[in-house]
Amino acid sequence: MTGSRLAYPTDLSQVEWAVLAPLVPPPKPGGRPPKHPRREIIDGLAYWIRAGCAWRLLPHDFPPWQTVYHYWRQWRTEGCWEEMLAALRALERTGQGREATPSAGVVDSQSVKATQRGGWHGYDGGKKVQGIKRHLLVDTLGLALAVCVSPANVSDRDGAMVLLARCAGKFPRLRHLWADQGYRGRDFLTWVQEETGITIQVVQRKDGGFRSTWAKANAPPREVPMFAVVPRRWVIERSFAWLGRYRRLSKDYEYLASSQENAIYLATIMLLLHRTAEAPP
């Protein structure tokens, strides 16, 4: 039971709420006292991100969808979701015996189909996807550091430049990134090194993948394994898989890029809370 209603599987536990409550913005002084507790608002958002439903389809035993959306939008514009994620990420890192801020990370992108709703969309010719591209920077634990959403036709390098610009001053220890071959290019790598002091290591695939092999005339082709673990790149692929558990992120349902970015922050917050409570996400 949560208050006067039956609990949903997505509701925060007592342990999770005890961790998150100090980070949730309190009611502003003056005016009428809030009608709905902050915990009910968060529970409504947890249901929304996991179930992937439209705002108007939130169950009636949550606060009105207009109220839940109001706080979602207000905390998004004030940067509260990113601040909550930063606090929980530091807590998780220190709990694993690491520094609060990372010294290395992994960058990659993911093209996602868009719905018929309007918005900022493009066509990714490589992935054959009409929609958006999520540019994601994570630490070596796979926790999101920065997110940028663009039309799907924006290159990985251009998205990475925006990510690194958003990280300026936030992660003073960050010095090295791993990336795939979409981030090749001497001009780009030189710009990153000169402007941010960060080195990017482009990791080559070791399996057969989509590459062809060559050999000298009258010589057998070189044996290429069908599968091989690629150093560090698996970290961010796992992060994308974590985000895939939240149905609101299965496609681009948002009109604004900032809504999609903060939905990723919210999903990562829920993942970290579940880890804190040692509950399945």
Image: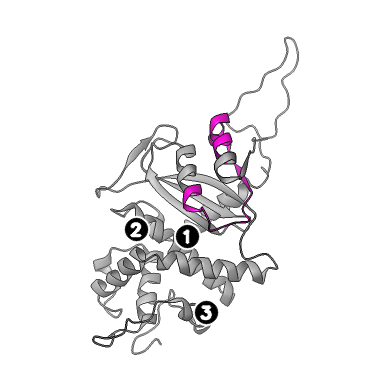
Question: How far apart in space, not on screen, are marks 3 and 2 (Cα)?
Answer: 24 Å
- Taking depth in this image into account, of 7 and 190 the one nearest to the observer is 190
Q: Is residue 189 magenta?
A: yes
Determine the secondary structure under disc 3: helix
Q: Quadrant of residue 205?
A: top right
The residue pinned by badge 2 equals: 259
**As displayed, is residue 213 above or below residue 74?**
above
Determine the secondary structure under disc 2: helix
- Taking depth in this image into account, of 172 and 9 the one nearest to the observer is 172
Q: Give how far across and how far down residue 74 sits, in percent.
A: 31, 68
The tag earlier along the polypeptide, 3 or 1, is: 3
Evaluate whether residue 281 shows in this view: no
Amino acid type, mark 1:
Arg
Q: Is residue 185 magenta?
A: yes
Horizontally, residue 98 falls left or right of residue 241, namely right
The tag earlier along the polypeptide, 3 or 2, is: 3
Q: Quadrant of residue 260?
A: bottom left
The residue pinned by badge 3 equals: 19
Question: Which residue ends up furthest to the bottom in the rendered image?
Answer: 4
Q: Which span is picked out in magenta?
A: 164-192
The residue pinned by badge 1 equals: 245
Q: Give how far across and how far down residue 68 sits, in percent.
A: 30, 73
Crowd around label 1: few <14 · some 14–19 · many ≥20 (10 Å): some
Question: How far apart in space, not on screen, are marks 2 and 1 (Cα)?
Answer: 18 Å
The answer to whether the residues at label 3 and label 2 have Cβ atoms under 8 Å apart is no
Which residue is found at the position 35% from the left and 64% from the top? Answer: 76
**As displayed, is residue 272 above or below residue 5?**
above
- Taking depth in this image into account, of 260 and 146 the one nearest to the observer is 146
| Circle 2 or circle 1, nearest the eye | 2
| Circle 3 or circle 1, nearest the eye | 3
Amino acid type, mark 2:
Ser
**As displayed, is residue 61 above or below residue 267?**
below
